[in-house]
Image (spheres, rainbow, N blue to C red):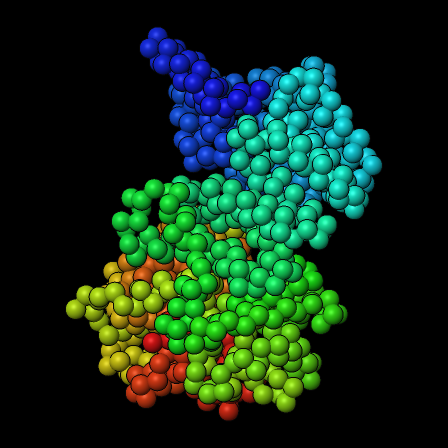
């Protein structure tokens, strides 16, 4: 294993395991399972590694082997670390540290302190990381653990590199390299050489950097350490890009992307999301390399390949369960979309599809795919167009409307319409002006925006052109997290429904639960929403049904009804928080059943994932329901869960919506859709235009967005 000959190591470990199992040496079995896990970890097969670690942990705990338990907690922490789940990794490392300190395992304490330093490094807390590394180094040096000394010196070099102290970083990397070469740690040698390359790259000495990267690659590739190989290929690609050798850059970056994709099969949805956030930069760099070569269509394919992947796989496996039986590798290939398929989706949707890609702090790419299948590309230089960052511009534009990110923070109503207009016009100038001539002239034609990152928070309907006209006055607007998602929501819309569906399930102002959004926080009573009650009663009348109000809307009674309705309208509070700590933020408030459980009455995004919905449309007429955790996979929250659970169209809000105008807007929306027979997107547009007449501030009418299908 230390020589990096992983398949051979596995052979010996498996022989050892067979003997130890035969003679009933439980402690030895635990140790060997741990070692086998470590090999799969190095090979980038994380689900498999986790399986072996968990078996090892169970044995250590059964036989009271504290040392084995400490080792396994530390190793499980390493897996979550590699998946980008840093808080979870920290939890395991801290458990390992406590055990190792208790049993005076000095070497183990050193290793775990080093790993905890790595977490703080990943979280950008460099001084704290350095503190842990220095503690780890002191211990490893005292006990003469050469391998750990090499690891920690390498990590200290990494911190100095992050802090821009390159000569100092180089010094530590070279010390680490000398030790690793002496003890024959192949994987470590590869890592140190790669890091030295990184320093020369930062210093602008690209040919020298390339030399080191190539050396590193020659060592790492034969070992089969996929994660390190991906990182080094990414660095080689980036260096060729800086040397303006774009063909070589493209080749290496594509190879890195293929490695990243080989690490994802078999992971849980949550782990796919977090690991993707550690890989996203390669997709952005590859787009840059393609656009420089005028390969803008291939860049669009890569932009699509690098978004909402976990969501797409989750949705596809729900739509056709037989997919789960297929080989994981071939499944990955199935989810790579090409230009022809992208054009076909635009034709099927009969819409202009606008995809945004934030490739760097300096570049924003926009593609418009016409309903005819024609593709146009625009590149925006952000530094030239903005005197601030894109994140700040989006935040400021929301604040100018009088809204912020979180429902719990009240914000002063804004009377400064001039400031509001300025911000909304600036966003229009950046996001819409470059493509305005490509958008349809007919206001009833559909435009589907595919945002990315902070652009998920942009209220597209409220963007204003130079004449002060709102975008919704000129276009019918929808959104989606990826073009490929539209293909799947379309399939969802066409699937047959049970014959006995109720027309509508309408809930308004349920008896509000008492909630605790974070452990240790004091419980809060959610406020009553009288406007939502009126809204629900009005809408129920349109569908000739009765709304569930107050105590009639107990969660346990509502759950079975959710899968029996063609339309679901929930006028209540929406929460952004991950109330259960399961990594899936978002919850909808229903009436508690009085069982005394924590957060009784909350329907969480995680629970929604387990439902089988048959509704054509779900409307969350509540605060912030379009929000959640913004990741490379899109927004992880309520809308994602609802679409996965079977709904092709979801209407959600981008901020804390005011009661009275929302009731007007929603009633108008249903009237347009049901009585005037407009499609959902046109019905929402007309409702916004009507509400705007009495409530001109966009805060009152622009919050809602339709995700998915218009029909």
Identity of the residue drawn at 63% across and 49% down: 249
Quadrant where the C terminus lies? bottom left
- Residue 228 location (% of width, % of height): 59, 35
Q: Quadrant of residue 615?
A: bottom left
Residue 60 visible (yes or no): no
Q: Residue 19 placed where, x, y %?
A: 37, 10
Q: Classify residue 338 as left or right of residue 610.
A: right
Q: Is residue 478 placed above or below 143 in the rendered structure? A: below
Where on the picture, by quarter, is residue 620? Answer: bottom left
Measured as percent of width and height from the top left, residue 563 is found at 26, 63
Find the residue positioned furthest to the top.
23
- Residue at horizontal 57%, vertical 17%? 103
**In the orientation shown, which residue stands out farthest toward the bottom?**
693
Name, please, the residue furthest toward the left.
Answer: 499
Residue 203 appears in the rendering: yes
Q: For this rendering, which residue is in front, 512 or 675?
A: 675
Residue 216 percent across, percent down from the top left: 65, 32
Q: What residue is shown at x 61% (from left), y 16% (from top)?
A: 104
Could you tell me which residue is drawn at 29 percent across and 75 percent down? 547
Relative to 340, residue 320 above or below: above
């Amino acid at each position: 294993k230390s020589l990096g000959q992983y398949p051979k190591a596995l052979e010996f470990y498996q022989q050892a395991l067979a003997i130890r199992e035969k003679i009933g040496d439980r402690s030895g079995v635990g140790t060997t399972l741990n070692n086998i896990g470590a090999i799969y970890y190095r090979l980038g097969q994380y689900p498999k590694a986790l399986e072996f670690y968990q078996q090892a942990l169970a044995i250590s705990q059964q036989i009271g082997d504290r040392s084995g338990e400490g080792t396994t907690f530390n190793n499980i922490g390493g897996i979550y670390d590699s998946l980008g789940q840093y808080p979870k990794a920290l939890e395991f490392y801290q458990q390992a540290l406590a055990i190792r300190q208790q049993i005076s395992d000095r070497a183990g304490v050193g290793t775990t302190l080093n790993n905890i330093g790595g977490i703080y490094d990943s979280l950008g807390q460099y001084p704290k990381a350095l503190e842990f590394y220095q503690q780890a180094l002191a211990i490893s040096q005292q006990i003469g653990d050469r391998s750990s000394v090499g690891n920690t010196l390498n990590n200290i070099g990494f911190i100095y590199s992050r802090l821009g102290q390159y000569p100092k970083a180089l010094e530590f990397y070279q010390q680490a390299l000398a030790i690793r070469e002496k003890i024959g740690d192949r994987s470590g040698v590869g890592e140190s050489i790669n890091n030295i390359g990184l320093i020369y790259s930062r210093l602008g000495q690209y040919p020298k950097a390339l030399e080191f990267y190539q050396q590193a690659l020659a060592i790492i590739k034969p070992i089969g350490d996929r994660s390190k190989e991906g990182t080094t290929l990414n660095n080689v690609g980036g260096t060729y890009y800086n040397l303006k050798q774009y063909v070589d850059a493209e080749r290496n970056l594509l190879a890195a992307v293929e490695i990243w994709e080989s690490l994802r099969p078999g992971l849980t949805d949550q782990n796919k999301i977090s690991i993707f956030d550690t890989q996203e930069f390669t997709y952005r760099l590859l787009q840059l390399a393609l656009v420089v070569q005028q390969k803008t269509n291939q860049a669009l394919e890569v932009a699509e390949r690098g978004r909402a992947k976990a969501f797409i796989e989750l949705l596809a496996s729900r739509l056709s369960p037989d997919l789960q039986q297929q080989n994981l590798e071939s499944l990955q290939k199935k989810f790579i979309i090409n230009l022809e398929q992208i054009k076909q989706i635009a034709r099927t949707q009969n819409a202009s599809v606008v995809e945004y890609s934030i490739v760097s702090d300096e570049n924003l790419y926009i593609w418009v795919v016409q309903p005819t299948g024609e593709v146009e590309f625009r590149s925006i230089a952000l530094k030239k167009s903005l005197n601030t960052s894109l994140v700040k511009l989006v935040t400021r534009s929301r604040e100018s409307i009088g809204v912020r990110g979180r429902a719990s923070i009240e914000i002063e109503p804004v009377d400064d319409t001039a400031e509001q207009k300025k911000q909304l016009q600036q966003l229009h100038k950046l996001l819409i002006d470059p493509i305005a001539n490509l958008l349809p002239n007919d206001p009833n034609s559909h435009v589907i925006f595919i945002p990315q990152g902070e652009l998920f928070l942009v209220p597209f309907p409220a963007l204003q052109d130079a004449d002060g006209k709102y975008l919704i006055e000129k276009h019918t607007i929808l959104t989606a997290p990826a073009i490929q998602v539209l293909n799947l929501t379309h399939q969802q819309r066409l699937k047959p429904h049970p014959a006995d569906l109720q027309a509508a399930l309408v809930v308004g102002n349920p008896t509000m639960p008492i909630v605790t959004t974070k452990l240790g926080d004091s419980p809060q009573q959610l406020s009553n929403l009288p406007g939502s009650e009126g809204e629900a009663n009005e809408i129920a009348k349109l569908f000739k049904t009765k709304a569930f109000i107050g105590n009639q809307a107990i969660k346990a009674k509502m759950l079975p009804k959710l899968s029996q309705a063609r339309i679901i309208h929930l006028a209540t509070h929406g929460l952004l928080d991950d109330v259960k700590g399961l990594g899936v933020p978002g919850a909808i408030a229903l009436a508690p059943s009085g069982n005394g459980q924590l957060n009784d009455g909350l329907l969480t995004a995680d629970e929604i994932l387990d439902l089988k919905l048959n509704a054509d449309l779900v409307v969350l007429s509540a605060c912030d329901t379009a929000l959640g955790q913004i990741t490379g996979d899109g927004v992880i929250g309520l809308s994602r869960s609802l679409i996965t659970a079977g709904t092709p169209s979801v209407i959600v809000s981008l901020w804390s919506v005011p009661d009275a105008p929302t009731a007007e807007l929603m009633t108008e929306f249903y009237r347009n859709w049901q009585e005037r027979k407009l499609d959902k997107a046109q019905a929402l547009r007309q409702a916004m235009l009507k509400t705007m007449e009495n409530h001109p501030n966009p805060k009152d009418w622009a919050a809602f967005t339709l995700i998915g299908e218009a029909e």
